[in-house]
Image (cartoon, rainbow, N blue to C red):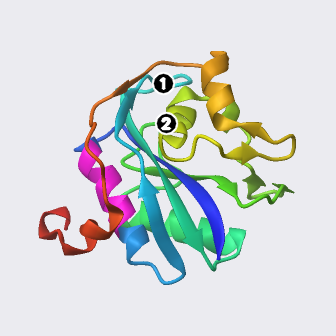
Amino acid sequence: MIRSVLSFGSNLGTREWNILRGVRLACMEPGIRVVALSPLYESEPVGEGFSGIFVNAAAVIETSLDPHGLLGVCMRIESDLGRARPAPGPDRVIDIDIVAYGDIVLDGRDLVLPHPRSRDRLFVLRPVSDILPGLRLPPDGIRVEDLVLSGSARGWVRRISSRKIVPSNFLNLKDLD
């Protein structure tokens, strides 16, 4: 099993539920075990053309899937929750990115690991720092917590939930359907 980190974001619909539904679907996926889920954060969009602020979270998972298999699962969950690719405009019901996949560095046409823009986005770094502050991003091994403390990441984030979220509980929640 490889430890990986996923980032979840939503700025359309019931944003919090979209995140929790995405995590629930990941919990139910063969080859994926969700180990930890960060609190939820609101964040400003980074880039042009967004119509609303995002809700974001991060999850630590253990997976037996290879990086492309994990990417395929993430894209299928996005599709199942209503994300269309390509969709007009940058708004999205759900966005799931692979922030890191173990210590793997990959520079492929369809997948780059670690995620190429994660170091610059506070909406990714802050939730990851809550659940895995010592995570070192390859290739240089800089810690996520140090990136947060440096103040170099773009955007603002505001925690909107402080309760501990236990991913295994999602399997029993009927109101997430």
For residue 90, the mark is 2
Whole-percent x, y for residue 120 in the image: 67, 27
Q: Nearer the viewer, residue 160 or 85?
A: 160
Image disc number at residue 161: none
Residue 22 belongs to magenta span: yes
At 56% from the left and 47% from the top, the residue drawn is 132
Q: Position of residue 40 (x, y in %)?
A: 34, 39
The disc at residue 49 is: 1
Whether pointer 1 and pointer 2 mark residues with C-beta atoms closer than 8 Å, the reply is: yes
Q: Splitting the image into 4 quarters, where does residue 77 fall?
A: bottom left
Q: Residues within 10 Å of mark 1 (few under 14, many from 20)?
A: few
Viewer-proximal residue among 107 and 167: 167
Q: Position of residue 2 (x, y in %)?
A: 67, 70
Q: Is residue 126 above or below residue 84?
A: above
List the single residue furthest toward the bottom: 30
Tell me the quadrant of the picture where the N terminus can be found.
Answer: bottom right
Secondary structure, mark 2, is: loop
Residue type of the residue flagged with mark 1: Gly
Residue type at the position of mark 2: Pro
Task: Please state if 125 lies on the left or on the right of 15 as rendered.
Answer: right
Compared across the picture, whether 123 is left or right of 174 comes to right
| Disc nearer the start of the sequence (1/2) | 1
Residue visible at 52% across and 55% down in the picture: 85
Q: Which residues are magenta?
A: 16-24
- Is residue 81 shown to the viewer in this render? no
Q: Position of residue 48 (x, y in %)?
A: 53, 22
Q: Nearer the viewer, residue 171 or 80?
A: 171
Identity of the residue drawn at 48% across and 24% down: 49
Q: Main secondary structure of the magenta part?
A: helix
Q: CA distance from mark 1 to mark 2?
A: 6 Å
